[in-house]
Image (tube, rainbow, N blue to C red):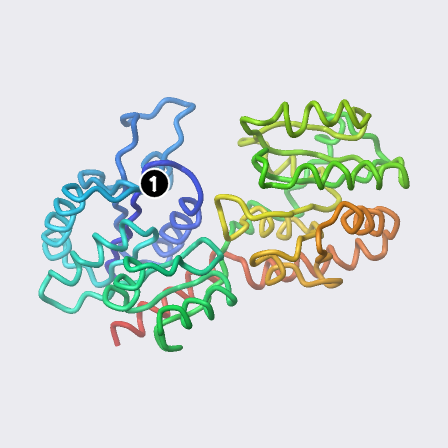
């Protein structure tokens, strides 16, 4: 099949990685995939520190189309220009399917596809893990410009069906995926525990998050303070950065006397997997810009149990007392869950096995691509 994927942004954030992962896996399965995205601020060849959808597409063997505006935010004249140009492009290239990933490319791509004068199915993936905003634009896009809506959360799927009057035939839930070959226990590098100053007997909890107010670092640090007084082996590994790093992490760590407990290693790229491998379990309290909570899937694929807040789609991914612990995240509840995992090696082992098994069965790229491929085939049948 010949498929056009549209992505209305140039920044490498949020749903960019799952969208490109899908394109890459579909290409491996023999499909002719074209990616059109926003133009990066840097030109090819890109500087080493450049991060963009365009650059990542090139690195995966694509030649992305960047001569459309495809901006993140709606601009009337740019949208009109894109609709006209995309409609011609879709016909000239004779695409079988148009797959959209964000609100803006859904609108312009959907209208362009409908203007081709032929049957050109439109598939929308919502990567956010929550129901789409109940507004006029989404109502038009979902009821007039969508042949199949893919959600990554069952709860969000049911909400969208109710809010927009969609039938079961028009919506499907497909788990967001991660690269289970990259994220797997075989890639653990315990030498990094020494590198980061961890002792052999330390029990390491980890959090992967931008350091922002809404990520509940205040609750986390209070819980760590309580739990570390109960178990002196506890360490907290913080992977992430943010503009409020000093206010939310550095200063409270000193004030609370947690300098020997908390290890902040910043934002990681090349050694991200190795950093995850240092954890014994993970804590996840609030979904970030990637509403599908990709970091949870990644640590589960590494065989790490997760303590998750009973919020958003987290309880859909983390099965309480099976692959992790689901809590109402007060400092006291979180501390209790942390102590439970630091002191019960057998429980950690059982959660580790179940977490790994679920990730391999549900979150693999192959599984996701196979299900999306089936959606395409049904639309073209």
* Residue drawn at x 70%, y 59% as measured from the top left: 323
How many numbered callouts? 1
Q: Which residue is mark 1?
A: 57
Quarter in which the C terminus is drawn: bottom left
- Residue 245 placed where, x, y %? 61, 26
| Left or right: 262, with 77 as reference point | right
Residue count near mark 1 (Cα–Cα under 10 Å), binned few <14, some 14–19, many ≥20: many
- The quarter of the image holding the N terminus is bottom left
100 relative to 368 in the view: left or right: left
Give x and y (percent) for residue 51. 40, 31
| Residue visible at 33% across and 60% down in the picture | 124
Q: Residue 273 lies in what quarter of the image?
A: top right
x and y percent of residue 203 in the render?
A: 81, 40
**Residue shown at the point (66%, 40%) measured from the top left:** 207
The extreme front residue here reads: 135
**Which of these two is toward me, 161 or 85?**
161
Q: Quadrant of residue 58?
A: top left
Asked which secondary structure carries label 1, the reply is: helix
Of residues 332 and 156, the one nearer the viewer is 332
Instruction: Decide: is 266 above or below 208.
Output: above
Residue 363: percent from left, percent from top:
54, 58
- Note whether 251 is above or below 73 in the view shown: above
């Amino acid at each position: 099949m010949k498929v056009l994927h549209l992505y209305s942004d140039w920044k490498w954030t949020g749903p960019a990685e799952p969208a490109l992962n899908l394109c890459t896996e579909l290409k491996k399965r023999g499909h002719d995939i074209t990616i059109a995205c926003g133009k990066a601020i840097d030109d090819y060849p890109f500087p080493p520190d450049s991060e963009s959808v365009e650059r990542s597409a090139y690195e995966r063997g694509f030649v992305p189309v960047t001569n459309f505006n495809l901006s993140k935010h709606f601009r009337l004249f740019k949208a009109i220009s894109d609709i006209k140009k995309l409609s011609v492009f879709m016909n000239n290239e004779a695409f079988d399917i148009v797959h959209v990933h964000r609100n803006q490319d859904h609108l312009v791509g959907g209208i362009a596809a409908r203007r081709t004068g032929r049957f050109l199915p439109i598939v929308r993936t919502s990567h956010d893990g929550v129901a789409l905003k109940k507004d006029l634009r989404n109502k038009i896009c979902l009821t007039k410009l969508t042949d199949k809506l893919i959600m990554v959360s069952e709860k969000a799927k049911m909400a969208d069906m109710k809010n927009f009057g969609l039938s079961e035939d028009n919506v499907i839930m497909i788990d967001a995926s991660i690269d289970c070959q990259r994220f797997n226990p075989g890639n653990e590098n315990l030498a990094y525990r020494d590198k980061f100053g961890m002792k052999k007997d330390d029990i390491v909890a980890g959090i992967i998050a931008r350091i922002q107010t809404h990520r509940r670092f205040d609750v986390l640090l209070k819980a760590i303070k309580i739990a570390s007084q109960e178990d002196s082996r506890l360490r907290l590994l913080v992977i992430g950065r943010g503009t409020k790093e000093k206010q939310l992490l550095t200063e409270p760590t000193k004030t609370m006397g947690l300098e020997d407990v908390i290890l902040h290693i910043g934002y990681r790229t090349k050694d991200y997997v190795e950093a995850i491998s240092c954890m014994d379990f993970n804590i996840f309290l609030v979904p970030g810009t990637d509403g599908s909570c990709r970091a949870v899937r990644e640590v589960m694929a590494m065989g790490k149990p997760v303590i998750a807040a009973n919020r958003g789609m987290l309880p859909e991914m983390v099965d309480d007392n099976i692959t992790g612990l689901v809590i109402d995240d007060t400092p006291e509840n979180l501390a209790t869950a942390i102590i439970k995992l630091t002191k019960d090696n057998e429980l950690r082992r059982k959660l580790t096995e179940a977490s790994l098994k679920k990730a391999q069965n549900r979150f693999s790229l192959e599984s996701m691509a196979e299900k999306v491929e089936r959606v395409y085939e049904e639309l073209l049948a």
